[in-house]
Image (cartoon, rainbow, N blue to C red):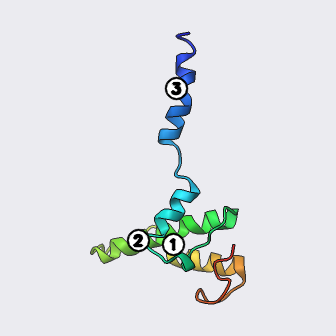
Amino acid sequence: MRKLLPLLLLPALVSCGGEEKHADRQAKLLKYRGADEVCTTASKACVTWTKMAIGCEENMQRRDEGYMGKFDRNWCSEMETYREAVTGVELSSDTGAYSF
């Protein structure tokens, strides 16, 4: 039984330290953006875009808090370019811009 104990604890360890789930990231993004400015599916495109959007919003928050340094990536440009490529909708305010 002692040999099995570490294996029994494995699911708890994975769930505690695992990667943030897509639904959690979407909820986090809603703190920054309105519901009409996010994708709502579990598609690969939505998962990828949501990660980029959070990076963008977190960088913008840091900038608002006074950070004047260079960011490692331009998440805002990347997420907008990606959204446009996935949806084919040029303006983020147009109908269908987040339908993916």
Mark 1 Cα-neighbour bin, 10 Å: few <14, some 14–19, many ≥20: many
Question: Eyeballing the image, is 2 above or below 37?
Answer: above
Residue at far left of view: 66
Q: Earlier in the sequence, mark 3 or mark 2?
A: 3
User: CB under 8 Å between callouts 1 and 2?
Assistant: yes
Question: 7 or 82, which lies in front?
Answer: 7
Residue 59's disc is: 2
Mark 3 Cα-neighbour bin, 10 Å: few <14, some 14–19, many ≥20: few
> For the residue marked with disc 2, what is the amino acid?
Asn
Question: 83 or 70, which lies in front?
Answer: 83
Say whether residue 7 is left or right of residue 72.
right
Which residue position is annotated with label 3? 9
> For the residue marked with disc 3, what is the amino acid?
Leu
Q: Quadrant of residue 8?
A: top right
Q: Quadrant of residue 49?
A: bottom right
Mark 2 Cα-neighbour bin, 10 Å: few <14, some 14–19, many ≥20: many
Whole-number angstrom distance, CA of label 1 to CA of label 2: 8 Å
Whole-number angstrom distance, CA of label 1 to CA of label 3: 37 Å
